[in-house]
Amino acid sequence: MESTLPFGSWPSPLTASDVTAASARFDGARFVGDEIWWAQGVPEEAGRTAVRRRLPGGGVEDVLPAPWSARSRVHEYGGAAWAVSGDGVLYFVDGADQRVRSLRPGEQPVTLTPPVDGAAYGGLSWQHGRLLAIREQHTSGRAAERAIVEIALDGTGPTELVGGSDFLAQPALSPDGTRLAWVAWDHPAMPWDRTVLRVGGIEDGAVASWTEITDGSGAALQPTWSDDDTVLYTDDRSGRWNLRRHRFGAPPSDEPLAPADADTGGALWVLGTRWYAPLADGRIVAVRTDGADEVVVLDPADGSARRLDVDATAYTSVEDVAGTRVLLITAGRSATLGVWEIDVDDPASAHAVAGAAPAAPPGWVPTARAVTVTGPHGEVHAFAYPPTNPDVTAPEDELPPYLVWVHGGPTSHVGPSASAKAAYFTSRGIGVLDVNYGGSTGYGRAYRERLRGQWGVVEVDDVVASASGLATAGLADPARLAIEGGSAGGWTVLAALVGSDVFSAGISRYGVGDARALAADTHDFEARYLDGLIGPLPEAEQIYIDRSPLSRPEGFRVPLLILQGAEDRVVPPAQAEAIRDALRTRGVPHSYVLYEGEGHGFRGRDTAIHALESELAFLGRVFGFETPDVPPLELSIGMLRVVTGPVGREIVNEGDMGPHTSRDLAVVVSREPIRPLFARAGSAPWERLLRENGFTEVTAADLPAGTGTERYFVLPPVLDGA
């Protein structure tokens, strides 16, 4: 029999530990003979990335054992930190020193690259018996030189094949080994803004000269040879990333393959990302994204496209092919992110190789619903996950609280999928709204470029419009809307809190509070990212100042949870601590949690569990529901503190209004920054502090004339003497 309980207080079988176990992180997958290899994060082993293999009999074992970790720091975000030869030799970037090593299963690793200060490798790929990589060499400050290199297998070191650009990625050798194709771009562009596809002939072990196949008007990605004279790639010159085929000859030809109003491509944040792969018979298996992902088989012979009936709707990449078999990393509506093996001619035989755990027991998984609202800048897309619990219903007159998720990037994308983290909240009666604001990928170049020059404006308006739309439709409680995001999403959280009154609470994970500090402190890959998002410096400095949340501290009025990694080199802790200090000065309830050993994005199991439990405890504290299954979270209330004074226990405010005691409290609470808290979220943190310390609520009629009409708390001795 169903129980009736308020939203937020629903009992749930899902723990933060369950969510961590179901939230796997992968970096590539490959067929190796009769085996399947993949790289997977191991939260319980300090977040290291292990390389694992599934044996023909079905058993799974680590190829790369602890304490080794395959992790690249090229472009800071890494990717493709391992490769494997056809005979089963692993090549990997050691996360500790960024050197490349080889490993035969069961033996000890052998170092292949020399110890060079500031050098890192990533984007490893095994091609036609040769090991290629991107080498990044930091010379001074944050600037770096990059090149495509071939790494000798005998340990004699790398040989540079080609450089000549600020950034290079996705090298592809022709089958006969005489040509190299790659994508390149220079500051201030990002790889989703403008890139060029280059092809050069290899002479004496290096590229002597090259031809640019594209003109740089689009963002060409993932060159792949189908034969010695034909290279496939994806480009968005039409407004959508679509596949194209370039044939060398007299004359050369370049043509689209099965164009569609969907994207086969995306933001190249990590090296090694793949959106398609040619099959041996000439067909191509590809991902197409228009909000949600789908997997299709294209036939260049007739231009046809056949959708495969597989549950792959989000974060899909095509990792490898063997005959008609394909390895995907994907998440679906029924399973979390995992490695899947499918047969393009028998999609019903698709099965999970790793990950793909159920997000929750049957009946507890929320169904993602596509939501589109109209905002100030046009349509805004999102996916809503409503409260879902088979054992509980809410009172008929109550609307649920909602947590609005803002993805990072900001050039990124979320798709509809079974999310263990979403189920953690929805099973307790807290809805989740995952927003693809203007600037997101997956909806074409025009939607992506809506954010150009408008970061801090467009995406803020879009998340506000999405949340407001849900409330206006009667699906969410407008007084209990919270917003959460990390990195660039954290910037949007902070900007939405200081620039609107829609949200009653915020959660910032390593969020950006000062755009000028980000431009000065961030790493080389993103050193000029803000040129396109806000404007070039120093010309646009005033815009940076005006849009930065820390420039508007008076706008912080609602409780905020700040989660930060101590070793974050993308958004250093100084940004989080500046936000904390602003909240403290303003007297805004907040909690600041600094995780030692964590960087930009949390990898450790204990960190992931603590962060998620802190989020739930925070929402319960602010929205007024009990969270007995997680540790309580204490909120700091800025510069206010309770002391023993002449009239008993007093509150002293040491904030930006100067010292005040409880004798003046009627004046203090009727002024900024305290007053807005009484109008937001039931003022629970303030009331708890005051009531627990012996203060009594009175009305304006009980106070001297002229003190206003706000709610006040005073000590009985003060009231008696008034």
Image (cartoon, rainbow, N blue to C red):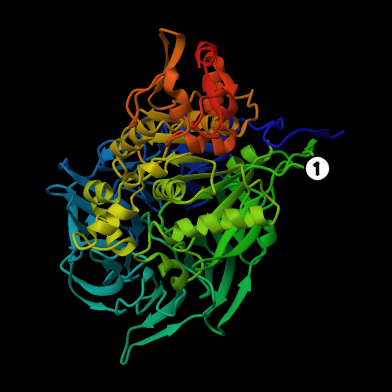
Q: Residues within 10 Å of mark 1 (few under 14, many from 20)?
A: few
The percent coordinates of residue 81 (x first, y second) are 35, 48
Residue pictured at 63% horizontal, 60% vertical: 371
Task: Say which of 216 and 462 sits in front.
Answer: 462
Residue pictured at 58% horizontal, 62% vertical: 292
Residue pictured at 69% horizontal, 57% vertical: 473
Residue 112 located left or right of residue 245: left
In the rendered image, the residue lying farthest to the front is: 705
Q: Quadrant of the N terminus?
A: top right
Q: What amino acid type should be assigned to the residue bearing mark 1?
A: Glu
Residue 215 in which image quadrant: bottom left
Residue 432 located left or right of residue 207: right
In the rendered image, the residue lying farthest to the right is: 1
Residue pictured at 15% horizontal, 41% vertical: 117
Tell me the SS state at disc 1: loop
Q: Label 1: which residue?
A: 396
The percent coordinates of residue 281 (x first, y second) are 53, 74
Residue 135 located left or right of residue 300: left
The percent coordinates of residue 327 (x first, y second) are 53, 56
